[in-house]
Image: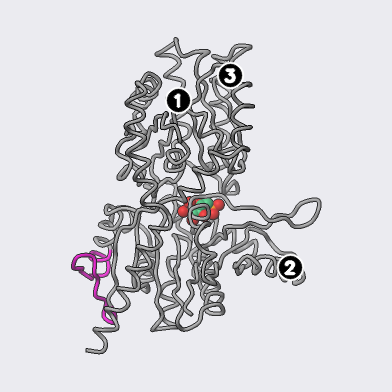
Amino acid sequence: MSRTIIVSNRLPTKALRTDDGLAFQPSEGGLATGLGSIYRADGNVWVGWPGLFVEDEAEATFVTEQLAADSMAPVFLTEDEIRDYYEGFSNGTLWPTFHYFAQLAVYEEDMWKAYVAVNEKFCRAVLEQAGPDDTIWVHDYQLLLLPEMLRAARPQATIGFFLHIPFPSYELIRVLPWRTELLQGMLGADLIGFHTFGYMRHFLSAVSQLLGLPNQHGQIETPTRSVLVDAFPMGIDHQRYADAAASEAADAHVREYREALKEVRVILSIDRLDYTKGIAQRLRAFELLLLRYPEWRGQVSLLMVVVPSRDQVAQYADLKVEIDELVGRINAQYRTIAWNPVHYFYRSFPLEELAAFYRLAEVALVTPMRDGMNLVAKEYVASKADQRGVLILSERAGAARELSDALIINPTDTGQLAEAMHEALVMPEEDQIARMTNMQALVRQYDVFAWTKLFMDRLAHAKSQQQTLATT
Ligand code: G6P
């Protein structure tokens, strides 16, 4: 039977060192939470980093066994590899470049070398798992070279690649000293998927201008093979979020929080700590709302969850300081004994508590500067059984292409964002219901299972066409 080997930098489960020994917990981030529901079927295996530096062989064996029981195969990375490949090239070079923050990007040859070496390490780990008939599905920007490495080792393999972040304009890509190698690495796949047609167009343009390879309707002919490129907007496990929101545990949390908040209305913001997410800009917009519309003081609070992320990367640590200061300033300026303008949490929450936040929130702010898709927007929609609630969504999140019934804003326009919050708070219920109904239908239909099926069917089709061509 053919299986799917999923490969990503981070596994959906992370190992942690605690006072009571090693513990295992769900990982954060769109990729892990999004795909977490689907990989266990049919003997599939997920290959990736478990988020822990193992101290010795015994520990490595223990982690490997624990994860194997849940269909995962760990790739252990050293502290140097994490510094140069993960914090360095992946999150210090590619992440800012692909999110249009090129001024933050570093260009270091040593980091590039580590990136190549770790992609090779992943290649060996995948080859250990994958049989000749298995399909290999590689994910995201940390592993751009892996499809080509796998292709060299297994010329006939079926290989898919999906990018979870934006693919930027050619003008950004051309700045990278290693642009050719990166594009060639991706072209090792049979099918390359992006969240939106815009990202796909940018990729095709970069391949044409940098490698001289044109395409026809998304099909690129390399000297040896054809590669198909297409858009597949990722969905969430709608049922899982709807069920969590309807659970007794979520009910209990909603009651508890409602009692604590009294009559105060809630605007919600949930993100990983990241400069791409527009968190500081969002705080300034909330401050402007309180300034422009004093009637909301004492009536509305911003409930802001920031999930710790990449805190060893300098820009992330700086952003944390900026957010702490902004929250401090706003609360110091406006708070009363009975009311807190911003409830700020710097930690992650279990699903039922997040579901309770989603249910309580009359408004959700998903206002990134750039975001490949943004699954929080879809999770909010899936959690709103009563269809009351307003989503304010950045035009620069991939999700804005689908969720056009949200209030779509430009996140750099603080005034527009403050006005959108006011508009959301006074929006008549029938408008809220109409918008939410449309968005729910979409999120329900195009869920993560539909997304996976679409990608896999397309990959099988692309492969079978290649084989037909090769035999005719
Ligand atoms: C984004 C990326 C993922 C990544 C996640 C969390 O969603 O597309 O590849 O796993 O962020 O980031 P981290 O660096 O903690 O894995």
First in sequence: mark 1 vs mark 2: 2
Q: Local crowd at mark 2 within 10 Å, few (<14), some, or many (≥20)?
A: few
Q: Quadrant of residue 303?
A: top right
Q: Residue furthest bottom?
A: 471
Classify mark 1 as within 8 Å of ligand 1 or not, answering yes or no.
Answer: no
Q: Who's the residue at 52% across and 57% down the image?
A: 37
State yes or no: residue 221 in magenta: yes
Q: Which mark is residue 4?
A: none
- Residue corresponding to mark 1: 284
Give how far apart the Cα atoms at labels 1 and 2 are: 47 Å
* In this rendering, position of residue 144 left or right of residue 410: right
Residue to which mark 2 is pinned: 62
Q: Which residue is mark 3?
A: 340
**Front: mark 1 or 2:** 2
- Which residues fall within the magenta stretch? 207-225
Q: CA distance from mark 3 to mark 2?
A: 46 Å
Give x and y (percent) for residue 126.
53, 75
Q: Is residue 52 above or below residue 459?
A: above
Q: Amino acid at mark 3?
A: Asn
The answer, for residue 409, to whether it is visible in the render is: no
Helix, strand, or loop for circle 1?
A: helix
Type of amino acid under label 1: Arg
Tell me if 151 is positioned left or right of 357 in this view: left
Q: Quadrant of residue 15?
A: bottom right
Q: Nearer the viewer, residue 380 or 213?
A: 380
Q: Amino acid at mark 2?
A: Phe
